[in-house]
């Protein structure tokens, strides 16, 4: 018997594969979320899916369809409030965030037979991932990578200086719309694994953990995806042996990775400074 024995089981293998694909998607999108300071938008999207998933579950259609419709509606609603109501981005997101969460809870509470499904919606059920779920995630991963590559220059310009992006003809407004669409796609794809309440952990944790160790955005994305994949594997093992919820454990390990990365980076800096100080003393 070895520590990795759970990965010999078919449904755990599917969970691992699904989780790695989620890590890839969130590694790419989460890097932009961190760089652009869009964490609140990502969280709002995650909560904004709740009404759509609840309605889809009640009427018997795939939850991911309801999640997509609800998240898309959230995105459009934020844009309309900002343009027509002259509200700031944070205010618009906050209003729709609370409204969507409240509506989702109302729908769930109105159904007496919703308890099990609600738990899966909020906290995920990655161990129930099917072959179809894996195929869907693989398709989303391909779309995410293609859009990220094609829009990379525009996204960088939008992050550095939107006015300069406009002057260069990179259409920053369209770039922002594409970036929001990527966040929506990532949140909808990842909710099956870690649930609507924990999906932001997968978006932020690995990207934050990768940031201090890289100087280029593509490298940050690759490292974030790798850290996320390790978090998935570790989370699955911990949940298996400790009897904890798999999705929540994966999300917690992802956030823990950010804390460990920050501590290690600080330690490396202290060692480097100490070494340089010692060298300067010897040569002086």
Image: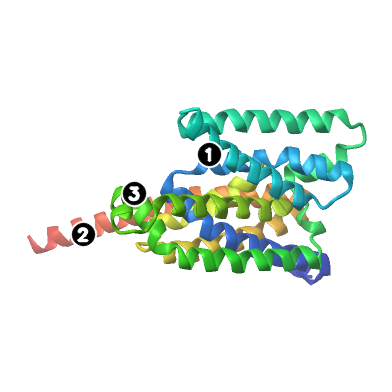
Residue 91 drawn above or below residue 262: above
172 to the left or right of 111: left
Q: Could you tell which of marks 2 and 1 lies nearer the N-terminus?
A: 1
Residue at the location (57% across, 63% down)?
Answer: 144
Q: Measure the alpha-carbon separation of dots 2 and 1.
A: 51 Å
Question: Which quadrant: the N terminus?
Answer: bottom right
Give 162 or 257, whichever is nearer the viewer: 162
Residue at the location (77% across, 66% down)?
Answer: 14
Q: Could you tell which of marks 3 and 1 lies nearer the N-terminus?
A: 1
User: Which residue is denoted by mark 3 in the rendering?
Assistant: 162
- Whether the residues at callouts 2 and 1 have beta carbons within 8 Å, the answer is no
* Numbered label attached to residue 251: none
Q: Secondary structure at mark 1?
A: helix
User: Which residue is denoted by mark 2 in the rendering?
Assistant: 276
Residue 68 coordinates in the image, percent (x, y): 69, 50
The reply to whether residue 191 is in sight is yes
Give 69 or 6, whichever is nearer the viewer: 69
User: Which residue is denoted by mark 1 in the rendering?
Assistant: 79
15 to the left or right of 200: right
Residue at the location (86% across, 28% down)?
Answer: 110
235 to the left or right of 149: right
Residue farthest toward the right in the current orientation of the protein: 113
Q: Nearer the viewer, mark 2 or mark 3?
A: 3
Q: Secondary structure at mark 2?
A: helix
């Amino acid at each position: 018997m070895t520590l990795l024995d759970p990965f010999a089981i078919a449904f755990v293998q599917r969970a691992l594969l699904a989780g790695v694909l989620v890590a890839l998607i969130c590694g790419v999108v989460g890097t932009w979320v961190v760089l652009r300071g869009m964490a609140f938008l990502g969280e709002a999207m995650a909560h904004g899916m709740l009404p759509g998933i609840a309605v889809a579950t009640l009427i018997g259609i795939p939850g991911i369809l309801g999640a997509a419709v609800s998240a898309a509606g959230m995105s459009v609603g934020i844009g309309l409030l900002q343009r027509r109501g002259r509200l700031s981005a944070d205010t618009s997101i906050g209003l729709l965030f609370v409204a969507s969460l409240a509506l989702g809870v109302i729908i769930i509470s109105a159904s007496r037979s919703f308890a099990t499904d609600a738990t899966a919606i909020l906290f995920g059920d990655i161990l129930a991932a099917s072959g179809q779920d894996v195929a869907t995630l693989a398709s989303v991963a391909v779309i995410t990578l293609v859009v990220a590559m094609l829009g990379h220059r525009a996204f960088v310009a939008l992050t550095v200086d939107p006015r300069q992006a406009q002057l260069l003809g990179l259409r920053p407004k369209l770039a922002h719309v594409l970036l929001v669409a990527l966040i929506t796609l990532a949140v909808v794809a990842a909710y099956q694994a870690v649930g609507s309440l924990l999906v932001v952990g997968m978006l932020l944790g690995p990207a934050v953990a990768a940031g201090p160790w890289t100087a280029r955005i593509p490298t940050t994305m690759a490292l974030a995806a790798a850290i996320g994949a390790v978090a998935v594997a570790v989370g699955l093992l911990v949940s298996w042996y400790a009897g904890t919820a798999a999705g929540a454990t994966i999300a917690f390990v992802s956030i823990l990775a950010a804390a460990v990365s920050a501590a290690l980076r600080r330690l490396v800096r202290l060692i480097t400074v100490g070494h340089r100080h010692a060298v300067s003393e010897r040569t002086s």
